[in-house]
Image (tube, grey):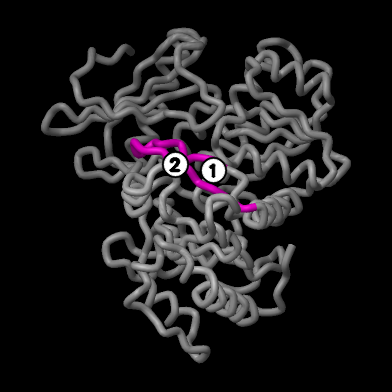
Amino acid sequence: MKSFHSRDELVERQRQRLLAMLDSTLPANRFYQSRLSACGPWGKELSLDAILRSLPLTTKTDLTEDHRRHSPFGSHLTYPVERYTRCHQTSGTGGFSLRWLDTPESWDWMLSNWAQVYEAAGVTAEDRIYFAFSFGPFLGFWTAFESAVRLGCLCFPAGGLSSVARARGIVESSATVLCCTPTYALHLGETLRAEKLEAGGLSVRRILVAGEPGGSLPATRRRIESLWKGASVHDHHGMTEIGPVTYQCPRQPGVLHVMEDAFIPEILDRASNAPVPPGTPGELILTNLGRLGSPLLRYRTGDLAQAAPLGRCVCGTFNLALQGGILGRIDDMVTVRGVNLYPSSVDEVIQRVAPQCEYQVHVHSSSALAEARVRLESSETATERSALAGRLEAELRNAFCLRFEIEWVEAGTLPRAEHKSRRWIRDDAPSDPPKR
């Protein structure tokens, strides 16, 4: 892991790499040729902040429109297509999937970033890593797997297997590390318990999670660790179009460090695009410094984050610390009766009050006043459900000054996902009255 002696040394390294990229790489990139034509020149005396302020922000919409006009890979390529050897794509949650190409050099850069995730989590060549992923076209699965192979770990790909088969595979292989989403870690833990596979003890000691905010939420972490006794949860995050970005602080669970030798992070106010002070939530903006085959300048990730004060962390690094990890998605926020709700905030309350229950939140906006309903899945008795519903309603009301309806469904009713879970549903049509 790259270390710096001071924050100033880190910033100067970022400035030099950004200037080199602006001078040598981006002039060959058609997407940025027009976007940067009115920018610069960038003198060697300019500060990093001054250079960044001169550059335009890049949005997902910009990339989507470019890919539509220049199908199938867009114009966002620095080199001829023949130089590229990898193709992955975004999840398409916004309605359009981007096909993202990488050169061998860019791929190697991302594997090196993933190595920092493993190093921070204490993973070594002696570990056996079980990858409970579908291994579809999404980049994170493949970079995690290949970086682990490079590290020297014994790796188990589990694409195409049922949850029961994966649970058995974890036990039979004596896997020491599990990689999956927080939601799927919970589901696999429940599967192990239902199949009585955990009775003889588990060898898993570390669970690396990503894809959802839960990995940095204390209540979710506690619930996962209660199911996987003896294992610790390690969060991180990344994006197909950006690559692996953060690793969990080795000394502070729930804090993510941005790999600032690889990225320049900013946290901006969504409306004004002005930097927000430490401790204030804003949108995470990223400039990658090593993915030269498909670079991004000041990319609006849509991720909500808040920074700790700059300086040396207790773990020794000067890398920017994100308190609470990724707090959620900017576009995931919903407004119910004038109250702004972020999924991660609601999840924290539900996991604290009802950690044993799977759930979904339905927001009904068909009437003039939107309403929120929590659907809980449990095998408890009617009396136990009533008491739990009362406690949860009270805690949600205290936290958000808002009344949530509580609806109970039978165990096994709500869907589980091995990629990104869909726990928040926005309904446009009226629904049946809630069951108590």
Camera-side residue: 139 or 212? 139
- Does the segment drawn in magenta span residue 99? yes
User: What's the residue at 76%, 23% (across, down)?
Assistant: 170
Amino acid beneath label 1: Leu
- Does the segment drawn in magenta span residue 317? no
Question: Residue under circle 2?
Answer: 344
Looking at the rendering, in which quadrant would you find the N terminus?
Answer: bottom right
Classify mark 2: residues with Cα within 10 Å, few (<14), some (14-19) or many (20+): many
Camera-side residue: 403 or 87? 87
In the image, residue 288 sits, relative to residue 425, either above or below, namely: below
Amino acid beneath label 2: Ser
Q: Left or right of 92: which side holds 148?
A: right
- In primary-sequence order, the first of circles 2 and 1 is 1
Q: Position of residue 177 (x, y in %)?
A: 76, 35
Question: Residue under circle 1?
Answer: 217
Q: Is residue 252 visible?
A: no
User: What's the residue at 58%, 79% (across, down)?
Assistant: 16
In the image, residue 31 sits, relative to residue 394, either above or below, namely: below
Q: Left or right of 122: which side holds 284?
A: left
Quadrant of residue 404 in the image?
top left
Q: Which residues are magenta?
A: 87-103
Q: Are marks 2 and 1 in contact (CB under 8 Å)?
A: yes
Q: Secondary structure at mark 2?
A: helix
Classify mark 1: residues with Cα within 10 Å, few (<14), some (14-19) or many (20+): many
Q: CA distance from mark 2 to mark 1?
A: 8 Å
